[in-house]
């Protein structure tokens, strides 16, 4: 039984040694893959840096353009408010003129109409005689 136990121990040790050698080979390959992956990531990082810098410049320009558009919209809005205020002032001025002239003109036309009627009636009564 002891010899069987010795054989099993030897087989176990040989298996463990083979497993260790296999793990060494796998780890060496894994190291190579990780090295390649590191190089690829470094290359991607180098190529991405200019793109990200350009993206930052584009973002800054968009912010600047957005600010200028906001300024122009404010100017247009102010101009429209000024035009509206001027139009309201013109309408108020027109209404004041109409109110101040309407009554005297109506009086004048009614007096003129009455005068014309009197003259017409005066000359009309002279014709009948």
Image (cartoon, rainbow, N blue to C red):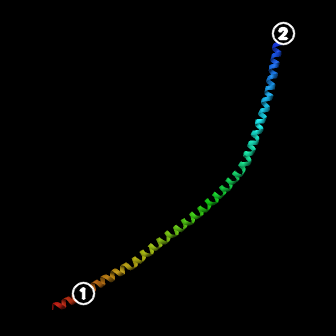
Residue at x 81%, y 25% (from the top left corner): 21
For the C terminus, give its image quadrant. bottom left
Expressed as whole percent of the image width and height from the top left, the position of residue 49 reads 72, 50
Residue at x 70%, y 53% (from the top left corner): 53
Mark 2, residue position: 3
Residue at x 32%, y 82% (from the top left corner): 109
Distance from disc 2 to disc 1, alpha carbons, whole Å, reads 159 Å
Q: Are marks 2 and 1 in contact (CB under 8 Å)?
A: no
Residue at x 65%, y 58% (from the top left corner): 61
**Residue 68 in which image quadrant:** bottom right
Q: Earlier in the sequence, mark 2 or mark 1?
A: 2
Which class describes the residues within 10 Å of circle 1: few (<14), some (14-19), or many (20+)?
Answer: few
| Circle number at residue 118 | 1
Q: Nearer the viewer, residue 40 or 71?
A: 40
Q: Nearer the viewer, residue 106 or 40?
A: 40
Q: Is residue 79 left or right of residue 101?
A: right
**Residue 30 in which image quadrant:** top right
Expressed as whole percent of the image width and height from the top left, the position of residue 69 reads 59, 62
Expressed as whole percent of the image width and height from the top left, the position of residue 26 reads 77, 29
């Amino acid at each position: 039984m002891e010899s069987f136990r010795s054989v099993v121990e030897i087989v176990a040790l040989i298996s463990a040694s083979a497993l260790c050698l296999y793990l060494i080979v796998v780890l060496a390959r894994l190291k190579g893959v990780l090295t390649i992956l590191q190089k690829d990531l470094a290359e991607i990082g180098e190529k991405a840096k200019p793109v990200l810098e350009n993206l930052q410049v584009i973002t800054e320009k968009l912010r600047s353009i957005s600010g200028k558009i906001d300024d122009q919209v404010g100017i247009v809005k102010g101009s429209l408010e000024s035009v509206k205020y001027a139009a309201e002032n013109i309408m108020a001025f027109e209404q004041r003129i109409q109110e101040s002239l309407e009554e005297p003109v109506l009086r004048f036309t009614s007096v003129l109409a009455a005068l014309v009627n009197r003259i017409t009636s005066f000359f009309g009564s002279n014709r009948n005689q």
